[in-house]
Image: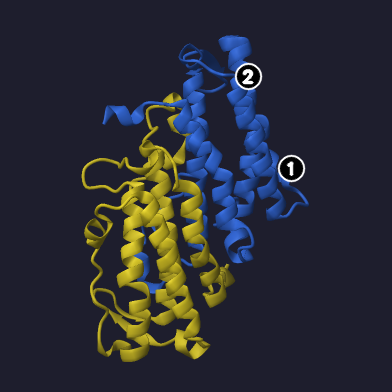
Chain colours: A yellow, B blue
Amino acid sequence: MPNSNKFSLTDAIALLTRTPVTLNALLRGLPDIWTHSDEGKDTWSAFDIVGHLNSAERHDWMPRVRRILESGGARPFDPFDRFAQKRESEGKTLEQLLDDFSRLRSESLAALQALNLKSADLARRGKHPALGAVTLSELLATWAVHDLTHLHQLSRVMAYQYREAVGPWSAYLGVLKCSGHSA
Amino acid sequence: MPNSNKFSLTDAIALLTRTPVTLNALLRGLPDIWTHSDEGKDTWSAFDIVGHLNSAERHDWMPRVRRILESGGARPFDPFDRFAQKRESEGKTLEQLLDDFSRLRSESLAALQALNLKSADLARRGKHPALGAVTLSELLATWAVHDLTHLHQLSRVMAYQYREAVGPWSAYLGVLKCSGHSA
């Protein structure tokens, strides 16, 4: 299915636009067992995942887009700080983090659309500090799939809270067999 | 974390209530690459997953609740028809399936709440045709986790469409490593 792997800015933006409203629909007002429980030591709850998405929105996606357009491969991206959200989420409620995510994502997408990127721009190259050469379209595709990998993680973290409550049905529920690759 | 595995009817209903609005937020109006692409032969697209949730809503969840309350273990559940949705989704749009799911889930939850279940009811036993003895609370917990297993699958199926578009970042995106346990 070669066509299914084609990147399209329109398709990516359509998905990126929906993530904040999806998380809001799923998580706002949900009991703490679903939003503040994790999978054990050094794992993330739904609250932590939303905090992480906010940090990525602040420090990674559009800053990396701009770095490619301004410096190409001459200046690598700043390294990703996976734990920035610990500081940035401190003292906030989940509802505040969801509001922050809606606002930050709207700002990001407005800035992205203002760039009015053309096909030739999408092929421009940047430098990832660990992965090496990457293109702008790969960065934008990764932004969309990063949303999905954390939706994948979120559904697993939530399901984990009922891993014993389902009794023998655990044999049929694939999410309970997920090995945590999306953490 | 023993407490995190405690079933609560309130918690389960809170989650079950949010699934239709979550899927609506994520999928309605999204380009076909996200909603009508699958992972290859004999796999499901987002469209198929919503159809499956509708079939489960029609044939499984509340019918099984009623079977436990009416017959206990004397009469096993009717087997689950995993492919009923092929017939029931035929000729419909994704938007129609999302509308159906909202309506069916609302009807299910209204019927569930009308039963006014007590703790003693949650311990009542039924008989699964393959798994054997199960309790009503296990059935209700499974209903919630079944939503999550298909949200898990959905995020994976969508991410799969950009598995090549992300380039070298595939190494960091856990959802692309998911082995399909939640199909």
| In the image, residue B176 above or below residue B137 | below
Residue at position x 65%, y 43% in the image = B101
Mark sitting earlier along the chain (2/1): 2
Q: Amino acid at mark 2?
A: Arg
Q: Are marks 2 and 1 on the same chain?
A: yes
Q: Quadrant of the N terminus of chain B?
A: top left
The disc numbered 1 marks a residue on which chain?
B
| In the image, residue A28 above or below residue B115 | below
Task: Name which quarter of the figure residue B170 lies in.
Answer: bottom left
In terms of depth relative to the viewer, which is nearer, A142 or B130? A142
Q: Amino acid at mark 1?
A: Glu
Task: Name which quarter of the figure residue A56 lies in.
Answer: bottom left
Residue at position x 32%, y 42% in the image = A36
Q: From the top left corner, tell me how far across and down residue B107 is, in percent.
A: 67, 33
Marker disc for residue B66: 2
The disc numbered 2 marks a residue on which chain?
B
Q: From the top left corner, tell me how far across and down residue B71 is, in percent.
A: 62, 10
Label 1 crowd bin: few (<14), some (14–19), many (20+), radius 10 Å: some
Q: CA distance from mark 2 to mark 1?
A: 23 Å
- The residue tagged 1 is B88
